[in-house]
Amino acid sequence: MKSRSTFTPYRRGPSAAQLMRKPRDATDFLTSDNAMATLMPAITRMAALQKSCAAILPAIFKSCDVMNFEGGQLVLSMPNAALAAKLKQQLPKLQERLLKDGWQVNAIRIKVQVGKNYVVPPVERRVLTLSTAAVASFAELNEALEDSKQNQALKTALANMVRRNTGVK
């Protein structure tokens, strides 16, 4: 007897080995290739140095990166000149602590990387409000001042402040 079979096109699915394999992370990828594997010690050292610097100066190192560390010279990048000036004031402290931690840092250079994306966190603004007694006192002062050319700017400022704090448009 002949059995009738329906034709199924050949589709290749994942092999059992592929199903059992775990996803590779960056470290696995770098160590698998000989050329990339030579970079691993340098990458590990730079990451450890970045972590040490961030532990010493956490506020400044949120926006700072270790660019290079060769021959005892540490090169750091900053997103703007103002932050670079702040870091420059802290360099003796940073170098001293790195030496204590075992890093042979003879000199530290700062490079300003203008194109680097750095977002300044927004400053939370306080809203100051005057009590009703204070607003009434300013309104009373505005009424008590004589109408003269010298007092006109002060009277205008007082009237605007009273208007803003009473909600009157």
Image (cartoon, grey):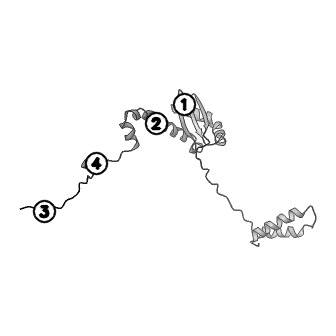
Instruction: Give the secondary structure at mark 4.
Output: helix
Foreground tag (3 vs 2): 3
Which mark, by number, is residue 99?
1
- Contact check, label 3 and label 2, Cβ < 8 Å: no
- The residue at which mark 2 appears reads as 43
First in sequence: mark 3 vs mark 2: 3
Crowding around mark 3 (Cα neighbors within 10 Å: few <14, some 14 to 19, many 20+) is few
- The residue at which mark 4 appears reads as 18
Q: Nearer the viewer, residue 69 or 4?
A: 4
Q: What's the residue at 30%, 47% (across, down)?
A: 21
Label 4 vs label 1: CA separation?
48 Å
Residue type for callout 3: Arg
Q: What's the residue at 89%, 69% (across, down)?
A: 144
Label 4 vs label 2: CA separation?
29 Å
Q: Quadrant of the C terminus?
A: bottom right
- The residue at which mark 3 appears reads as 4
Q: What's the residue at 37%, 37% (across, down)?
A: 31
The picture places residue 87, in percent across and down from the top left corner, at 63, 39
First in sequence: mark 2 vs mark 1: 2
